[in-house]
Image: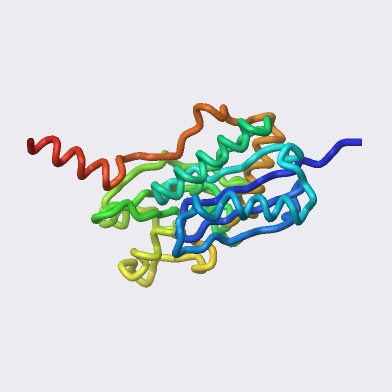
């Protein structure tokens, strides 16, 4: 008898972190981390509570699925490091999922093309385009940082828009630009689960020692340090 995979899911790219457990495609429990507190403080206790509720031991977990970003620098570091530590300690697999791929998957069925945005500070956005291919989504271009105005001027006319970047930029979009419901802008544990299971089914996982978040630029603290160093 085949034992269904048991998964720990960590999503810490956005304003509120999520910790979830799943058995195969069924979510068994979820905890939302307090937006006003650091994810590092709540993540481990939340995972322990969920495991206890299911009467699972840490070594019962088949794989830990973690959101890779783009997103909050601090949140992503906490999530990825926690996933790597858990995988190293228990021997389970670790599967990184690109955050924008999870957001794209949440689009309504009538959407065929979508641009996913996240705030990249100043006047820039992280952006990546996706196209529906049957019941799956495929990246139509590489993740990039672009000026918001440049992206808006060059976006495909039939592309919908989603992503956590709309929390800042929604008001700057013309009325004619189609936008998915705001409940779908942030990645959900269900979407990470789906994409994680896809990778496991393809016998694909990541190296727990080398896995890193998706960073396209240094953090604001690193930029400030470089600026100070250059002026010395």
Nearest the viewer among 160 and 116 is 116
Identify the image quadrant of residue 143.
top left
Quadrant in the rendering for residue 215: top left
Report the residue at 20% width, 45% height from top: 224
Can residue 160 be seen?
A: no
Residue 50 as seen in the image, left or right of residue 155: right
Q: Can see residue 156? A: yes
Residue occupying image coordinates x 40% and y 63% = 166
Would residue 132 be found to the left or right of residue 63 on screen? left
Rendered position, 26 above or below 167: above
Residue at 32% from the left image edge and 45% from the top image edge: 145
Q: Quadrant of the N terminus?
A: top right
Of residues 49 and 104, the one nearer the viewer is: 49
Residue 176: % across, % down:
38, 69
Q: Residue at x 61, y 53 (%)?
A: 45
- Front-most of 231 and 169? 231
Q: Is residue 82 above or below residue 166?
A: above
- On screen, residue 105 above or below 229: below
Question: Residue 80: x percent and y percent?
Answer: 51, 40
The C terminus, quarter of image? top left
* Percent position of residue 108, x then y: 59, 62
Q: Residue furthest right?
A: 1
Q: Position of residue 193 (x, y in %)?
A: 65, 48
């Amino acid at each position: 008898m085949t034992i269904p995979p048991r998964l720990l899911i960590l999503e810490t790219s956005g304003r509120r972190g999520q910790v979830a457990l799943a058995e195969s495609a069924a979510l068994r429990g979820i905890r939302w981390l307090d937006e006003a507190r650091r994810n590092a403080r709540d993540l481990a206790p939340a995972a322990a509570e969920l495991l206890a509720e299911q009467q699972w031991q840490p070594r019962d977990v088949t794989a830990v699925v973690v959101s890779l970003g783009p997103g909050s620098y601090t949140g992503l570091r906490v999530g990825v490091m926690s996933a790597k530590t858990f995988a190293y300690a228990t021997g389970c697999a670790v599967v990184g999922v690109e955050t924008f791929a999870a957001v794209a998957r949440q689009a309504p069925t009538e959407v065929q093309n979508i641009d996913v945005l996240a705030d990249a500070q100043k006047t820039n956005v992280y952006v990546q385009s996706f196209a529906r291919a049957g019941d799956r989504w495929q990246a139509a271009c590489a993740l990039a940082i672009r000026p918001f105005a440049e992206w808006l001027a060059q976006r495909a006319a039939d592309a919908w828009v989603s992503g956590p970047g709309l929390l800042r930029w929604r008001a700057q979009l013309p009325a004619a630009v189609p936008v998915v419901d705001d409940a779908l802008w942030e990645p959900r544990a269900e979407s990470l689960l789906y994409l994680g299971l896809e990778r496991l089914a393809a016998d694909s996982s990541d190296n727990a020692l080398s896995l890193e978040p998706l960073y396209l630029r240094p953090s604001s603290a690193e930029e400030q340090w470089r600026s100070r160093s250059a002026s010395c």
